[in-house]
Amino acid sequence: MALTPRPPWEGKRIVLGVTGGIAAYKSIQLARDLTRLGATVDTVLTRSALSFVAPLAFEGVTGRPALTDLFSAEGAALHIRLGRDADVVCIAPATADVLARAAQGRADDLICTTLLATRAPVVICPAMNDRMFAHAQVVRNLEHLREELGYRIEGPAEGALAVGEGEGPGRMLEPWQITEAIGRALAAGPPFEGRSVLVTAGPTHEPIDPVRYVGNRSSGRMGYAVAQAAWRRGGRVTLVSGPSALDAPYGVERVGVETALEMREAVVERAPEVDVAVFAAAVADFRPSEARDRKVKRTETGASLTLDLEENPDVAIESRGVRREGGVRVGFALETDDLVENAARKLEAKGFDLVVANDATEEGAGFGVSTNRVTILDAGGGQDVLPLLSKDEVAEHILDRVAVLLQGGSHG
Ligand code: CTP
C-alpha cells in the first residue's frame, strides 16, 4: 500500500486504544502507517499496555503526545473531547479485559470512557491466547459488542501466538489489515455498501508441461488495489485471481485460478449476481494446444521447440451475456500503440461501461510497478486523463466513476 496522505484516512481523527497484550508492539507500526496516510492519531495506552510498549514510541511515530491518564494535565474531560472529535475509535490489541469492561460500559480508564463518549464507529481487534478467546464469557462479550453496540470486531487471525503458546485463533490482525478495517469504518456507505463486486486480477499461467507455462508479467497489483478499495467502500468483494505473490486483500474473498479456462468458469458462474465487475486480469490470449503430462526433455526436442497455441476464451466477453441488469462493467486496455482508439474499440466490443487505458511503453505505468498513468474512457466518448498515480489512487478514481454509474449517473 502506498503510504502517502489519501482518502479515506487523510484529515481524519483516529483514537488508537492500546491495551496490555504482546501484540502492542505491532500497534506502533499501525500508528505510524495511519499517520503517514494523513490521519491524526491520538494514542491512548492502558496501564497494562505500559508493560509492553512505551508512550514515547507512539509519540515518535504520530508526532502527538500519547495519553495514559483519565485525569491529567491535558485538561478536564479529555475523554469527552477525544470521543467527540474522533472519526474512528480503534482498540488494537484488545485484551479479554478491555472487552469485558467495554461490554459492561465501565468508565475506569481513558479508553473505556472515550468509548462511552464517542458516537464514531468503533473497531475492535482482539488479541489473546486461543484458550482465552474460546472462553464462553469472552465469546459473549464479543457478541454483545458486535450485536448490541454495533462495534466492528476485526480478527483475530489464526496463526502463531506468543512464544510457547502455539498456534490458534487469537493472533491480532496485521497492521495493514487493521488500517484497511479502519478505512472501511471511515469509507463504507452508498452506493457500494452491500453491493456485490467481482474483480479479476493477475496473469494466467497456461501449462506447457507440469513445470513450464506461458504467462505474462502482470503482478496483479492493479486488480488487488481495486478489490481492496471496493471492500473499504462497503462492497462484498470477490477477487478471481491468477497466480500472484500478493497477500489477499483484507476482507475480500479470493478465488485462486491458474488458467484462462479456470478464470472464465469462476467468473461466468458468479457474473449473474454481480453489481460491479472489474476486469483487471491480464488473461493470456493463447494457451498451448496440448499440455503435456510429463516434462518435455531436451533429449526429445533437440535444438528447437515449436509450441502450437490456440485461442483462449475472452472472460469479459463470455460473462457479458450473463451480466446482471444494471450492473456496471469496467475493463482495462493495455496498449503500446493508438491507446485511445484501441481502448474505445475494446469498450464497444466487450460491453464495458468504462475502460481504463494505459500505455505499456510509458515509464511508471503497466506491469510490475506500483504506479500507473491511465486514461478512463466512458461509453459516451468521454476521456479522463489522469496523472501518474499510485495504483491505490487509480483504484479510487475508477471507483468514483463506478459510483456515479451505480447511482444512475449518465455514461457521458
Ligand atoms: N480480457 C479478458 N479475457 C481475455 C482477454 C482480455 O477478460 N481472454 C479482458 C481484460 O481483463 C481487459 C480487457 O479484456 O479488461 C482487455 O484486455 P487486453 O489484453 O488489453 O485486450 P485483448 O482483448 O486481449 O486484445 P489485444 O491483446 O489484442 O490488445
Image (cartoon, rainbow, N blue to C red):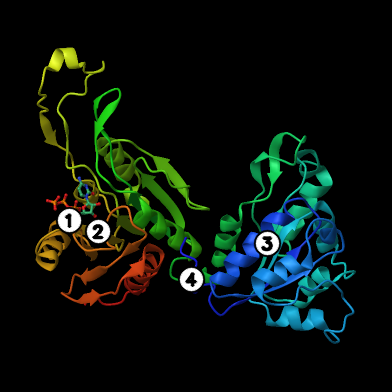
Please tell me which residue lies in front, 402 or 21.
21
First-in-chain label (2 vs 4): 4
Q: Earlier in the sequence, mark 1 or mark 4?
A: 4
Q: Is residue 12 above or below residue 160?
A: below
Residue 4 is marked as 4
The amino acid type of the residue labelled 3 equals Ile
Q: Which residue in the structure is indicated by mark 3?
A: 28
Q: CA distance from mark 3 to mark 1?
A: 47 Å
Label pair 3/1, CB-CB below 8 angstroms: no
- The residue type indicated by label 2 comes to Gly
Q: Is mark 2 within 8 Å of ligand 1?
A: yes
Do the numbered discs 2 and 4 sit on residues whose CB atoms are within 8 Å? no
Checking the image for residue 350, the label placed there is 1
Q: Residue at x 37, y 65 (%)?
A: 395
- Residue 27, position as x, y percentages in the image: 68, 59
Q: CA distance from mark 2 to mark 1?
A: 8 Å
Of badges 2 and 3, nearer the viewer stands 3
Determine the secondary structure under disc 4: loop
Q: Quadrant of the C terminus?
A: bottom left
Q: Amino acid at mark 1?
A: Lys
Q: Quadrant of residue 242?
A: top left
Q: Is residue 157 above or below residue 152?
A: above
- Mark 2 or 4, which is nearer the eye? 4
Can you tell which mark lies on residue 331?
2
Residue 252 on image: x %, y %:
48, 51
Q: Are marks 4 and 3 in contact (CB under 8 Å)?
A: no
Nearest the viewer among 282 and 74 is: 74
Asked if disc 1 is less than 8 Å from ligand 1, the answer is yes
